[in-house]
Amino acid sequence: MCRGSPQIRVSTRLVEIGVIVRDKNGPVSNLTKNDFTVLNRGKSQTIRIFAVKPSAAAK
């Protein structure tokens, strides 16, 4: 690290993951957090916050 540069340490417990789900008919709607599995180093993680945000790409 360069002298004079501040060192920043950060820890977070919130990770945002954006996804677009499609099938052969196009975008899939009405999904819930129970339709997803998030893994960290092979270990399943609890999804505590889940939000659906319409995307122009999903239309």
Image (tube, grey):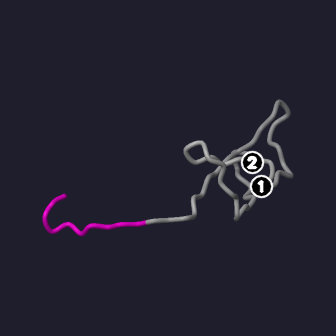
Q: Nearer the viewer, residue 32 or 53?
A: 32
Category of crowding for the residue at label 2, using alpha-carbon neighbours closer than 10 angstroms: few (below 14), some (14–19), many (at least 20): few
Res 57 quadrant in image: top right
**Residue shown at the point (74%, 48%) measured from the top left:** 36
Per the rendering, the mark at residue 33 is 1
Q: Is residue 48 left or right of residue 30?
A: left
Q: Is residue 27 magenta?
A: no
Instruction: Write the residue at 60% across / 58% down.
Output: 16
Q: Which residues are magenta?
A: 1-10
> Measured from the top left, where is residue 31 in percent x and y?
82, 51
Residue 33 is left or right of residue 19, and the answer is right
- Judge whether residue 6 is colored magenta: yes
- Tell me the amino acid under the disc marked 1: Lys
- Predominant SS along the magenta part: loop
Q: Nearer the viewer, residue 24 or 10?
A: 10
Location of the N terminus by quadrant is: bottom left
User: Please, what secondary structure does the residue beneath circle 1 have?
Assistant: helix
Kindly indicate whether the residue at mark 2 contacts the one at mark 1 (C-beta within 8 angstroms): yes
For residue 44, side relative to residue 54 (left or right): left
Report, in whole angstroms, how far the alpha carbon at label 1 lies from the one at label 2: 6 Å
For the residue marked with disc 2, what is the amino acid? Phe
Furthest residue in direction top, as rendered: 24
Please, is residue 31 above or below residue 10 in the view?
A: above
Q: Is residue 8 above or below residue 31?
A: below
At which x and y percent is residue 50? Answer: 73, 61
Q: Residue at x 15, y 68 (%)?
A: 4
Q: Which mark is residue 36?
A: 2
**The one of 26 and 48 positioned closer to us in this rendering:** 48
